[in-house]
Image: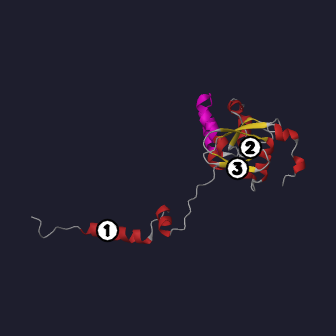
């Protein structure tokens, strides 16, 4: 969905949003300078940043896969945003107060919330905030379980065959042969002729 210039309103150009990066990785955003030229900024670590609604919409428009959109997947937590961004439009965009509210919700409501949350960053944030609340161990474990389900698997890939073998859980053929030969020598036993 490409943005046309007609979809950007004066309110989009004037409203300055504030977001906080809570992801352990770096995301990029687009800023517009005074002439309207794009300037890219990398957002890393846990930090707060500001951009206009227009800049956010342009950034989101450039993201091919919606699951990689940091504004929607929970990598960026909203601090000051327009009323159009709320829990209904983005269930992963929860403030700390909203998370504490979820912790206090009924069992049914808590389980429904967990079903809708699919952002590892949001779920990690919930685990980080849990010690500050009176959340039960059962609910804490439910959040951990949900995080394990939605968290992408870590995959290490390399073109270097030796490194790939090293990173593999299975021993290589040469390692197996070496360990078998060493085991045979160890099992031979006996005494040296020179031993007295």
**Is the residue 74 above or below the residue 105 in the image?**
below
Highlighted range, magenta: 124-146
**Is the residue 165 above or below the residue 1 in the image?**
below
Badge 2 marks a residue whose secondary structure is: helix
Crowding near pointer 2: few (<14 within 10 Å), some, many (20+)?
few
Main SS of the magenta segment? helix
| Chain-order first, disc 2 or disc 3 | 3
Residue 1 visible from this viewpoint: no
Say which residue appears at 15% left-offset and 68% top-offset: 192
Quadrant in the picture for the N terminus = bottom right
Pointer 1 with pointer 3, Cβ within 8 A = no
Taking the magenta stretch, the answer to whether it contains residue 119 is: no
Q: Which residue is mark 3?
A: 40
Q: Kindly indicate the quadrant of the structure image that contains residue 139.
A: top right
**Is the residue 49 above or below the residue 188 in the image?**
above
Disc number for residue 182: 1
Residue 42, given in percent of the width and then of the height, sits at 65, 48
Disc number for residue 174: none
Q: Kindly indicate the quadrant of the structure image that contains residue 19.
A: top right
* Number of numbered callouts drawn: 3
Q: Which residue is mark 2?
A: 116
Residue 116, given in percent of the width and then of the height, sits at 74, 43
| Chain-order first, disc 1 or disc 3 | 3
Quadrant in the picture for the C terminus = bottom left
Crowding near pointer 3: few (<14 within 10 Å), some, many (20+)?
few
Say which residue appears at 54% left-offset and 64% top-offset: 158
């Amino acid at each position: 969905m490409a943005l046309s210039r007609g979809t950007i309103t004066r309110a989009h150009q004037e409203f300055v949003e504030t977001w906080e990066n809570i992801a352990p990785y770096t995301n990029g955003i687009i800023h517009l300078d005074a002439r309207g030229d794009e300037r890219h900024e990398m957002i890393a670590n846990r930090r707060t940043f500001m951009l206009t609604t227009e800049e956010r919409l342009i950034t989101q428009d450039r993201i091919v896969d919606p699951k990689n959109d940091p504004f929607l997947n929970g990598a960026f937590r909203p601090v000051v945003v327009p009323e159009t961004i709320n829990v209904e439009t983005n269930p992963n965009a929860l403030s700390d107060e909203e998370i504490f509210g979820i912790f206090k919700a009924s069992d049914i409501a808590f389980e429904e919330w967990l079903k809708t949350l699919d952002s590892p960053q949001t779920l990690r944030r919930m685990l980080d905030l849990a010690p500050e609340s009176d959340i039960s161990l059962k609910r804490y474990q439910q959040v951990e379980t949900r995080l394990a389900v939605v968290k992408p698997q870590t995959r290490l890939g390399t073109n270097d065959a030796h490194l790939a073998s090293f990173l593999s859980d299975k021993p290589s053929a040469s390692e197996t042969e070496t360990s078998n030969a060493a085991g045979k020598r160890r099992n031979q036993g006996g005494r040296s002729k020179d031993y007295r």
